[in-house]
Image (tube, grey):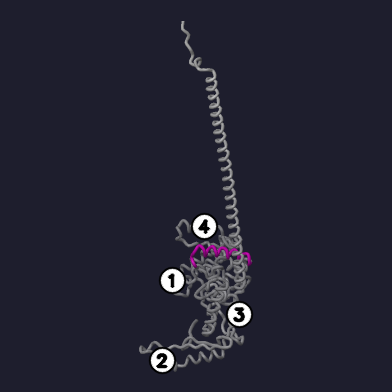
Amino acid sequence: MRKVRNEEDEIPKSVLKMKQDKERREELKNKELKNKGEQGKHSDKSNNKKGAKSKSKKDKHKNRLLRKIILILILILLIAGGIALGISAHNWKVLSEAMFTNKMSVVLDKEGEVIAELGNEQKKLTPVDIEDMPENLVDAYVSIEDERFYSHHGVDIKRTGGAILSYITSFGHSSYGGSTITQQLVKNLTGDTTDSITRKVKEWWKAFLLECYFSKDDILEMYLNVIYVGPNVYGVQTGAKYYFNKDVEDLTLAECAYLAGINNSPNYYNPFEGYDNEEDITDRTLTVLQKMLELGKIDESEYGKAEKEVNNGLDFDQGEIEIGDCIYSYHTDALINEVIQDLADEKNISEAFAKNYLYLSGSTIYSTQDSSMQDKVETESLKSQYILYSANGEDTSQAAMVILNHQTGQVLACTGGLRRKRDF
């Protein structure tokens, strides 16, 4: 039998060994390359992890820095807002305290003589202390205007919330309403009657501050002495004189209810204006009396007596109220305009507010008017020799004159037209 020879048996051992050595080297080399590749992968992964960690740290640092900047800005805004509110509160305190004196301001000429009392054109009598007002009058106003007056702090949250809800549900077509007596007083002092959200928010803020500065009685007293109660008639004392020809302390319960009831529309409920409003006056007065009874301000007996008086017809008796001479000189007119503008600019308030301030603050305004010279200038302007008629026979010539002290720049006298001056 023939023996089969293996291929390796024919290769010399030396050659075979070399071949085996080469294969082992290649195998080792491949293992090394493989190991390096795996190490490289591990290294890349490690580097990627380190890079990701580094990037995460940078992002966290940026976020922390951004949060710090935002917090600092918010803090700055809060501080600035606080300072602004503080300044506003201080200015309002200074202005309101002066106005609570409720005295007319006067203008003096260069010799110190009074030449004008500002607000004299209004029908208003001497303010009355709340202690001298009938309790029924105070209760009537509080009952119909602001029944929670003694419990809120300037703003009645319940009424205000209802007013805001009504405004929202009607898509802005309803009035805000909900004004407390304190808020009404703010409006009377500032003269701001604009219908805007901004104005209302300012009114809330000022009402809150008034309650911090003054007592409830102080606020109510001021309110009752400055409210509008009829044609150019201000204050309950003047109202009592105008409608019933008596002092406020002598008003009956029914008369007090009438005066408080007309607050929402004084001109309409005026019995002397020729309106057919007798039934409306009766209904409105009884509404006030019923509210007073409901709140326990009066008892059934008092209500019954007042109701009978109202149904029989209130005894209206128009009293005469004198007003001062409010036709000032041209010089004084110009001075008043300038003072109002200066006040508005200096205090950052409206001209209406500045005008009310002059009417109530009891300020003294020193003018440069030389009254003797002013009288001569005005007398000269009345002379007919300066009146020249136009071709149509209606229009006439006009003239103006200003006399200055050139050393001081003071205006001593001036006129703005011919003929007699009739108004402001």
Q: Is residue 26 visible?
A: yes
| Residue 205 in which image quadrant | bottom right
Answer with mark 4 or mark 3, whichever residue precedes in sequence.
4
Residue at 58% across / 43% down in the picture? 53
Measuring from the top left, give residue 297's x and y in whole percent.
Answer: 59, 63
Residue under label 4 = 162
Residue under label 1 = 276
Mark 2 residue element: loop
The answer to whether residue 171 is left or right of residue 37 is left
Answer with mark 4 or mark 1, whichever residue precedes in sequence.
4
Q: Is residue 303 visible?
A: no
What is the CA distance from the residue labelled 1 to the residue labelled 2?
49 Å
Residue at 52% across / 22% down in the picture? 19
Answer with mark 3 or mark 1, whichever residue precedes in sequence.
1
- Name the front one of labels 4 and 2: 2
Query: Is mark 3 in CB contact (under 8 Å) with mark 2?
Result: no
- Name the front one of labels 1 and 2: 2
Which stretch appears magenta? 194-214
